Amino acid sequence: LLDTPEACQDLMDHAAPPGYFSKLRHMHNEDFLWRYNINLARQVAMGSQLRLRFEQEAKLLRKFVAQVARRDQRIQARESEIKNLEALLETEAGMKRAAEEKSAGLSQELERMRVQFSKLQVSNERLSQQVDALQQQVSGEETLKAAFETTSDNKTRWVIGHRLRLAMMKCAESLEMRQAFADVVSVGIAKGMSEGLKHGVEHRHAQRTDDTGEDAPQFIRDLRPSSSQLSIPIYPEVCDPQNPWACKEEIKLTDAIAANISCAEQKKRSRIGLALLLVDAAMQTKSDDA
């Protein structure tokens, strides 16, 4: 930059002190040239130093500008990161507030559940006491029921036996009661005979598939008909007024004979049982009176 003549002339014009050239005018040529060369060398050295300093300052300036640019970029990146962190911080703050609110709600819910659990414990204890009391009451009632049933059965049997003995005593003392008792017994015997006759007929009919006539009486054998061919009518207990001679059914004579024999045996056993019952009732009555 200072190698051109215009630059050197301009530098000399501006860098030379006042009165410099007037002093050179009175010098000899050798002194002038020597002085001029010295000044020129100084000026060139000064220019080189200035140029180096300028270039160094320019490099420093460019470096500083680059550093400033990098710092600006870092600052912008930091600012962007700060903004992101602020947004994240706000989000976390919102989440924290929501979590605190939720925690407060859960704390209230936990406290309410604790209170409810305490109430349930008290209720459970009370119900357990009631259950224990009811179990004791039920066990006591079951024991009382068993004792009452035993006592009731004994009393019932005693009352039935006592009333039966009283009835037998009244029957033994009263003619009307005897007659009524005899009628009842007769009706029972007649019903038993009727049922026994029916069952006997069915039984004999099932057993006898081949009638040889050996079981028939002699007067029937003399007539020479087969007993399996003879039949007798069975009339109902209550006659029909319009048709009094209407029979209910007809059965074989052999079956009727067998049924009558069976009914006679049943009647005999019934009379024996009734007599034993009367004797037992009389004995019980005497023992109670004693």
Image (cartoon, grey):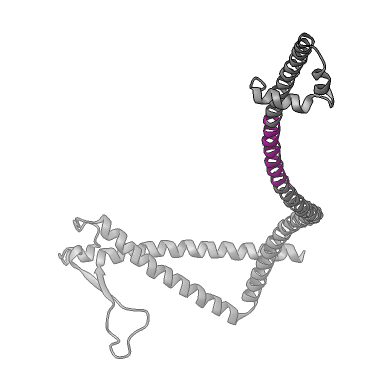
Q: Position of residue 178 (x, y in %)?
A: 58, 77
Q: Position of residue 201 (x, y in %)?
A: 30, 64
Q: Position of residue 161 (x, y in %)?
A: 66, 65
Q: Position of residue 255 (x, y in %)?
A: 28, 64
Q: Please report the bounds of the magenta region as a residue range.
A: 66-89
83 above or below 194?
A: above
- Residue at image location 68% in from the left, 39% down from the top: 76
218 above or below 14?
A: below
- Residue at image location 77% in from the left, 8% down from the top: 30
Q: Would residue 126 appear left or right of 269 to someone viewing this image?
A: right
Q: Quadrant of residue 54?
A: top right
Q: Would residue 24 appear left or right of 73 to someone viewing this image?
A: right
Q: Would residue 260 appear left or right of 280 to someone viewing this image?
A: left
- Residue at image location 75% in from the left, 51% down from the top: 97
Nearest the viewer among 61 and 246 is 61
Q: Note whether residue 152 is visible.
A: yes
The outermost residue toward the bottom is 242
Nearest the viewer among 201 and 146 is 146
36 inside magenta stretch: no
Q: Quadrant of residue 208?
A: bottom left
